[in-house]
Image (cartoon, rainbow, N blue to C red):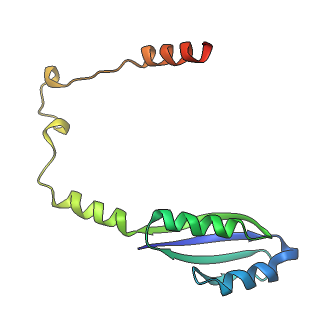
Amino acid sequence: MNVSGLVVRVNPERFAQVLEVLEAAPWAEVYTHDGESKLVVVIEAEDTAAEMAVYRTIEGVEGVLSVELAYSYSEELENARDELEVQDGVPEVLSDEVPADRVRYGGDVRTLLKEHLEKLQD
């Protein structure tokens, strides 16, 4: 479950209509507003993709000028953090104890840039 707090900026001439739409929406809760052009909206969604769909829906409401993410909690992220905390120690590849001759690097930024520029010229 993801929960996010949004600041929704609205054209003052359309404020009442936008407020009505958002208050009626099952996917949003208008937490507070200034009565003129700004609303604080809380949304919940099962995952990040669903959360972004709600975000875009709010952006598409006639009269909405902008939607800004003010806070976000992601259960997916918390689960990943919990999983990392359970792991024992640091993986060997990240250890400072690994001798430099065992570290493999397979790239060269200059070569990559040169190849990219050549592709653009073709």
Image position, residue 51 (x, y; %):
52, 67
Q: Is residue 88 left or right of residue 59?
A: left
Residue located 44% across and 18% down the image:
112
- In this rendered view, identify the residue nearer to me: 53 or 40: 53
Instruction: Give the quadrant of the C terminus.
Output: top right
Q: Is residue 31 left or right of residue 20?
A: left
- In this rendered view, identify the residue nearer to me: 76 or 97: 76
Residue located 22% across and 57% down the image:
84
- In this rendered view, identify the residue nearer to me: 66 or 118: 118
Image position, residue 15 (x, y; %):
81, 78
Image position, residue 61 (x, y; %):
74, 71
Up/down of 11 relative to 35, above or below = above
Residue located 67% across and 87% down the image:
24
Up/down of 17 relative to 56, above or below = below
- In this rendered view, identify the residue nearer to me: 102 or 121: 121
- The outermost residue toward the front is 122
